[in-house]
Image (cartoon, helix red, strand yellow):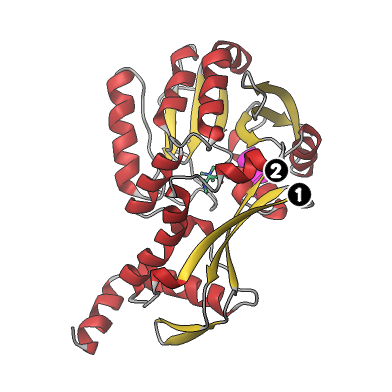
Amino acid sequence: MSVQAYAVRDEQRPPDNVLLQVVQRGLRSQPKRLPSWLFYDEQGSALFEQICEQPEYYLTRAEIALLNQHAGDIAQVLGPDVRLVEYGSGHAVKTRLLLEHLATPVAWVPIELSTEPLRRSMEGMAKHFPQLPIQPLAVDFTRPLRLPVPPRAPRRTVVYFPGSTIGNFEEREAAQLLRKMRGEMGDNGGILVGADLKKDRATIEAAYNDRAGITTAFTLNMLTRLNRELGCNFELSAFRHRARYNAMAGRIETHIISQREQRVRVGRLQVLFREDEAMLVEYSCKYSLEDFAALAATAGLAVQRVWFDPEAMFSLQYLTRAI
Ligand code: AVJ
């Protein structure tokens, strides 16, 4: 393809420029880092679903077991006529378990940047709940939101944020995100948020280093994506996945490690990787109950209720306004 063809394509596709800027900035910083949302192209989303089925990845099974056991109780606490605003349209099974128990929900508002997963989860949900109004929002949920006007007045707006995705954010950003949700839910609202719990290192590390190698493929797929979408030349066999639990910080830290000294083209930038240089691609924070209550408090929220799966691996926390 000619240089000109590239230029034209770039002009017509501003999202690529944003992507290039994000990636160049991350690869220029010291130490190098890339944001974890870059994992979720179509292939990455499919790999994540496979991760959820690995025997070592306990989070999804635990959260579903939790809902199987407690969805009735959770629905009672939330009460009737809830508007359920979901951050990420994610694993539809969880939302379904919840909605099945909610009394006369006003609407389900799934928020998901990529339109294809959004469309798919809407289709599935519409089949299960033909009466339920669905008001999708194809936007980035970390940005300020304008929620659609509900079809009738809800008694309460509940922001549902399952999966421990909150753990991907550093503490300050997580608090900021909770504060934003607090604004969106209003005075009488609540936040239902999944939070993975601190536990022994071996269990946590195994979850991010499955034996089948799916997590490795998921991590390295980020480079495949950058090769395809930005014309980078990452050589996949020269990088590897590393996920370690930092007990002091209470989080899994996932890095992509360069196995040798090498240069990679990122737009007009040449990026040098040293041998064994580590590039940070994800945090997955783990919480004690105290940790999470403290995080909620910094966002002006109080923990009303906490539910656990039968093995107490995972928690679902219900937060309301503290002040
Ligand atoms: C989707 C953010 C909950 O951090 O556990 C799984 C993503 N990364 N294995 C997590 C993930 C590696 C996952 N979340």
The residue where tag 2 is placed is 201
Judge from the rendering whether residue 5 lies leftward or rightward of residue 86; answer left or right: left
Mark 1 → mark 2, Cα distance in angstroms: 8 Å
Most common secondary structure along the magenta stretch: helix
Decide: is 246 above or below 258: above
Q: Position of residue 291 (x, y in %)?
A: 78, 40
Q: Amino acid at mark 1?
A: Ala
Q: Secondary structure at mark 1?
A: loop
Q: Are marks 1 and 2 in contact (CB under 8 Å)?
A: yes
Mark 2: which amino acid? Arg
Work out whether 230 lies above or below 289.
below
Residue highlighted by disc 1: 247
Label 1 CB, ligand 1: below 8 Å? no
Q: Nearer the viewer, residue 82 or 202?
A: 202
Give the foreground label among 1 and 2: 2
Q: Is residue 38 left or right of residue 122?
A: right
Q: Is residue 161 visible?
A: no
**Could one spot residue 274 in this view of the protein?**
yes
